[in-house]
Image (cartoon, rainbow, N blue to C red):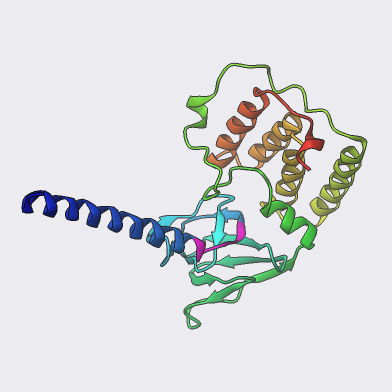
Amino acid sequence: MSQITRMFRLAQAGLYLAGLVMVFLTTTAHASSPDVGLVTSLTGGVSFWNAADQKEPAQVQAFMKVRQGDHFKLSSGSQVQILYCASGRQETWTGPAIFSAEEQKGQTVDNKTTAQPEIKIVPPKVSKRIMEAPIPFPRCNIRYSGVIQTMTPGCPASSNAPVSPEARVQIVKAEAVYRDSQKEAKAGDLTPELYLLSVYAEYSQYAKMEKVIDAMREKQPGNTTLKELKAWVHNQSSLPTTDPRKKR
């Protein structure tokens, strides 16, 4: 083996090892930033960044998954509401403000200019159900970018997947919780709807999901996330359905 060939192979091996290191570091970075909450309401200009995986500031999106270590900056008059899964703590921050998302709550970064958030405690069964929902929220592991373009023709979303008697009971209970939560929710807070969507999604009740999303869009017609979710739900309803009892 010539010296040139040996050097070429060593260079190849070095590049391969460097690639493995980059994959490991990327995986570690993402693993170090677990999902801790969800943006349940958003008004005005709010940006965020994360030293682990989102160093450049970006605009917060409605219903975006919040990761531990996320930093939020609110312009004057803007507002963001975050629901923390582990604690059921729902915080409403009003700008100007800068804070970071910890495991169970937000932490002010600049106490001089940042006021404390308005706090509401949501039942854990509601907060955990929303966080675990099989719905492609922004920054979720389920990707849905371009979903409108990739939709394929199929049956209209007018039918729901069959459910077992036990599942039907759970759905009825969830609808009751939704109605009670609606009575306590403030204007612009779509947490009750997000909870109901999460239950319907678990049991593949896509037609019902579409109706809920339509009602949400009436409240927030400019919400682009809702538009994309509507397209995703319609696409899911066009796919062959399976018995939800097999998922449990």
- Residue shown at 70%/52% (left/top)? 130
Residues in magenta, as a range: 31-38
- Can residue 15 be seen here? The reply is yes
Depth check: 239 or 233 in front? 239
Q: Is residue 32 magenta?
A: yes
Depth check: 223 or 236 in front? 236
Residue that lies at the very extreme toward the front in this rendered image = 1
- Residue shown at 63%/17% (left/top)? 154
Indicate the position of residue 198 as horizontal and vertical percent values.
72, 45
- Residue shown at 56%/59% (left/top)? 66
Indicate the position of residue 248 as horizontal and vertical percent values.
79, 43
Quarter of the image for residue 65 reads bottom right
Residue that lies at the very extreme toward the left in this rendered image = 3
How many numbered dots are placed on residues in this image?
0
Q: Is residue 55 magenta?
A: no
Instruction: Answer above or below: position of 181 versus 206.
Output: below
- Can residue 185 be seen here? The reply is no
Depth check: 129 or 25 in front? 25
Indicate the position of residue 105 as horizontal and vertical percent values.
62, 72
Depth check: 85 or 17 in front? 17
- Residue shown at 72%/57% (left/top)? 128
Residue 17 lies left or right of residue 219; in this view the side is: left
Residue 84 lies left or right of residue 68; in this view the side is: right
Indicate the position of residue 34 as horizontal and vertical percent values.
56, 62
